[in-house]
């Protein structure tokens, strides 16, 4: 990775913290006398800089890896839950684990009914029987 200037690093930290590219540029560089279009253009060019892109990726990578929880992990955990339920001879927990695995695989889908009245009010019902007057 190319060595970044302190201002480039400050720009990267501002982008990572949630600032827009333009605001990040303003935080890192003296831009008070620049036209807004110039600041936006400079920020855009800075984002295209290979060193800046590499630094942003390096900062994001551990966060993304930590937050990734995918289907494979969920399936393994559901299988573990099933095995524990089986060893405890807990039929209800076994069924719950099977249902979870089926939902994760898209074999079961929760049905949702949405009813809208003429006045625009929306009633939301999930797996509930119709209401009797």
Image (cartoon, rainbow, N blue to C red):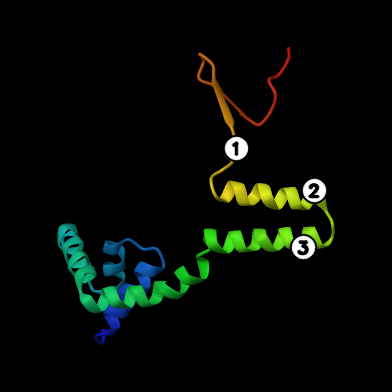
Labelled disc at residue 84: 3
> What secondary structure is found at the residue carrying circle 2?
helix
Judge depth for marks 3 and 1 and give the one in front. 3
Q: Earlier in the sequence, mark 3 or mark 2?
A: 3
Nearer to us in this view, 108 or 124: 108
Labelled disc at residue 71: none
Which quadrant of the view contains residue 84?
Answer: bottom right
Looking at the rendering, in which quadrant would you find the N terminus?
bottom left
Nearer to us in this view, 106 or 52: 106
At which x and y percent is residue 42? Answer: 17, 67
Nearer to us in this view, 98 or 48: 98
Cα separation, mark 3 vs mark 1, equals 25 Å
Which quadrant of the view contains residue 56?
Answer: bottom left
Looking at the rendering, in which quadrant would you find the C terminus?
top right
Left or right side of 80 for 25? left
According to the picture, the residue beneath numbered tag 2 turns out to be 92
According to the picture, the residue beneath numbered tag 1 turns out to be 110
Q: Are marks 3 and 2 in contact (CB under 8 Å)?
A: no
At which x and y percent is residue 43? Answer: 22, 66
Residue at image point 37% right, 77% down: 58
The crowd level at tag 3 (other Cα within 10 Å; few <14, some 14-19, many 20+) is some
Left or right side of 21 for 62? right
Say if 124 sits above or below 84 in the image: above
Cα separation, mark 2 vs mark 1, equals 19 Å
Left or right side of 3 for 61? right
> What secondary structure is found at the residue carrying circle 3?
helix
């Amino acid at each position: 990775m190319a060595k970044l200037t302190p201002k480039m690093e400050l720009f990267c930290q501002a982008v990572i913290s949630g600032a827009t590219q333009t605001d990040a540029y303003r935080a890192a560089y003296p831009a008070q006398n620049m036209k807004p279009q110039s600041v936006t253009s400079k920020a855009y060019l800075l984002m295209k800089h290979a060193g800046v892109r590499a630094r942003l990726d390096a900062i994001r990578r551990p966060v993304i890896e930590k937050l990734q929880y995918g289907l494979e992990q969920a399936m393994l955990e559901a299988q573990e839950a099933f095995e524990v339920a089986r060893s405890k001879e807990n039929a209800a927990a076994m069924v719950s684990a099977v249902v979870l695995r089926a939902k994760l695989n898209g074999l079961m889908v929760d049905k949702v009914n949405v009813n809208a009245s003429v006045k625009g009010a929306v009633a939301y019902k999930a797996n509930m029987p119709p209401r009797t007057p």
